[in-house]
Image: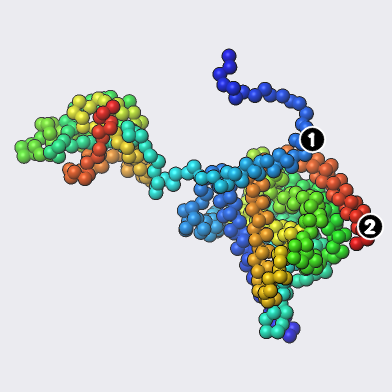
Amino acid sequence: MQLTNRSKVVSDKNMTAMEAAYLPAVIKGMAVTLKHFFMRPATTKYPEQTREFSEVYRGRHVLKRDEKGAERCTACGLCAVSCPAEAITMVAAERKKGEEGLYREEKYAAIYEINMLRCIFCGLCEEACPKQAIFLTKEIAPASYEREDFIWGKDRLVEGVEETKRIDITKRQDR
Amino acid sequence: MEMLFLLDKTVIAFVAFAITLLIATYSTYAERKVAAFMQDRVGPDRAGPFGILQPLADAGKFFFKEEIIPNTSDKFLFIIGPGISMLTALMTSVVIPWGGTLQIAGRDISLQVADLNIGVLYVFAVVSLGVYGIMIGGWASNNKYSLLGAVRASSQMISYELSMGLALIALIMMTGTLSLKEIVDQQHGMNWNVFYQPFGFLLFIICAFAECNRTPFDLPECEAELVGGYHTEYSSMKLGFYMFAEYINMFISSAFMASLYFGGYNFPFMDSLGLSQNAITIIGVFVFFLKIFFFIFVFMWIRWTIPRFRYDQLMKLGWQWMIPLALLNVFVTGLVILLTGN
C-alpha cells in the first residue's frame, strides 16, 4: 500500500562524473545556504516577544471572583482530588460576619497553593470545579531560579478586584 | 630620517597587530551570526545592540574560567603549545601589503611592515611552523584523543602544504617575483591574477581551507570522534588562544588570497577617478579589507554548508588529486609562457 508519493527507491549505483567531481555539488549546497541566509529567522525572541496562543490555551491558573468581587472558591477540594499530578493543596476556613464581600460562600480557602512544577496543565481542575472558581489562562508560569517561587499561593492565583485586573476566561467557558 | 622610518614601521606594525586581533575577535561573532542566519536563527543578540559585545563577553568568560593542567602532562610544553600557535599566526601579517604608499610631509610611507623580497616564501615558512603549536599541544596533553588530533593535524597540513606550494609556483612563474608588494603592484587596476590562474586559485583556496583546519577539513578537532582533537585537555585562555589562532589564520589566509589572486588594494578604474595619491591609497585599504571580509565570509559559508571528509578521503584528495592537478597547472602555465614568450 502506498501512503505518500514521496518515497524514493534507494540504489547503490556508481557516481556519475558530475557527482564525483564534488565541486558542482558544493556549489549547489552553497546556493541553498545562501538562500537561507536571506530568509526570515523562525525565532521568537521570548521575553520581549511571545508567540500567539490559541484562545483556549491551558496556561497558569486563576482563581476567579464574582461580579461583586467576592472569591468564588469554596474550598470543596474537588480540584485537588481531580488533579492527576497532586499539585493542589488547600486549607479551608469558615467565613466570619462582615466578610460577605470577600467570600461568596460560608466556607472559603484560607490557603490555596498550586505547585507549578508538579502541574501538568491538563485542565481537570477547572472541569471538576462546581463553583466556576478555577480556570486556566493564556499566560505561562514564568521561569525562576528558586524552587519556592513555583509554589503559587493565593497572592498570585486570585485575580484583582478592579475591573482592569480581571482575567478574561470567557473563551474557555464557551467551549 | 632613520628614526622616522623606524617610527613609521613601528606604528604600522602596531596598527596591523591591533587590526588583526580585532578582526579575529569579531570573526567569532561573525561566525556565529552567519551560522545562525544560514540556519534561519537569530544568533547572539543579548550582549549590546545586535549582540556586538558578545566577543568581549566571551573573552571575559575565557579569562575567568578555571584553568586545568592535567597531572600527567608535560607542563612546559603544555603551556608553550598555544603560545606557539598564536605567535606563528600573528607573525605572517608582517609581509602583507595593507595599502599603497601614503605621502605625509613630503615622505613616502609604504603601508607594509616589511617588503621582503621572499615574502611568499616567508609566509610559507611561518605557516609550516604553525603545525608545531598543534603538535606540541596535542603531544604534551598525554591524552590519546589529543595525540590523534595532533597527528591528524600535522599529516593533513604537510600534505596540503605541498599542493598549496605547487599551486603558487604557477602564479610565481607568471609574476616572476616572490615579493608580495610587487605581485600586488603587477595587478594594477583590474589586471587580477585570478583571471589568468582561475584553476590555480581554486587549488589554492581548497588548500587554504585545509591549512586553517576549517570545514570540510576540520578533522584535527573533529568533535564527533575525537572529543575536541588536539585541544581536548585545554581550558581557560589557553583554549581561547588555540581558537583565536584559528581565526587569525583565517584572516591572514584571506588577506593572502586577496593580495595574490584578487589584486590586493587595487580596484577597477583607480586611475581614471582623478583622485590624489593619498585618497587612492586610503580607498585601496578599504577595498582590500572588503576583499578580505568577502573571503572570511566564504570560509564561514563553506563551513556551514559542507560536512567534513572522512580521513582516507582527505588523504586521497590531497595526494591523488590535488598534487597531480597542481603539477598539471604548473605544466600548462609553463607551456603557455614558453609559447607566448612572456
Q: Which mark is residue B338?
A: 2
Residue that carries the numbered disc 1 in the rendered image:
A17
Residue A148 in view here: yes
Which quadrant: the C terminus of chain B? bottom right
**Same-subunit check for callouts 2 and 1:** no
Up-down relation of residue B118 to residue A10 (above or below): below
Crowding near the residue tagged with mark 1, few <14, some 14–19, many ≥20 C-alpha atoms within 10 Å:
few
Q: Secondary structure at mark 2?
A: helix
As drawn, is B250 to the left or to the right of A44?
right
As drawn, is B131 to the left or to the right of B304?
right
| Quadrant hosting residue A73 | top left
Q: Amino acid at mark 1?
A: Ala
Q: Which residue is at the front of the view, A142 or B206?
A: B206
In the image, residue A120 lies at what x, y percent?
A: 36, 31
| Quadrant hosting residue A143 | top left
Up-down relation of residue A9 to residue A134 (above or below): above
Q: Which residue is at the front of the view, B66 or A128?
A: A128
Mark 2, chain letter? B
Which quadrant: the N terminus of chain B? bottom right
| Quadrant hosting residue B144 | top right
Residue shown at the point (79%, 35%) measured from the top left: A17
In the image, residue B164 lies at what x, y percent?
A: 80, 53
Q: Amino acid at mark 2?
A: Leu
As drawn, is A62 to the left or to the right of B217?
left
Residue shown at the point (14%, 37%) measured from the top left: A67
- Label 2 and label 1: CA atoms lie apart by 32 Å
Residue shown at the point (55%, 57%) measured from the top left: B55
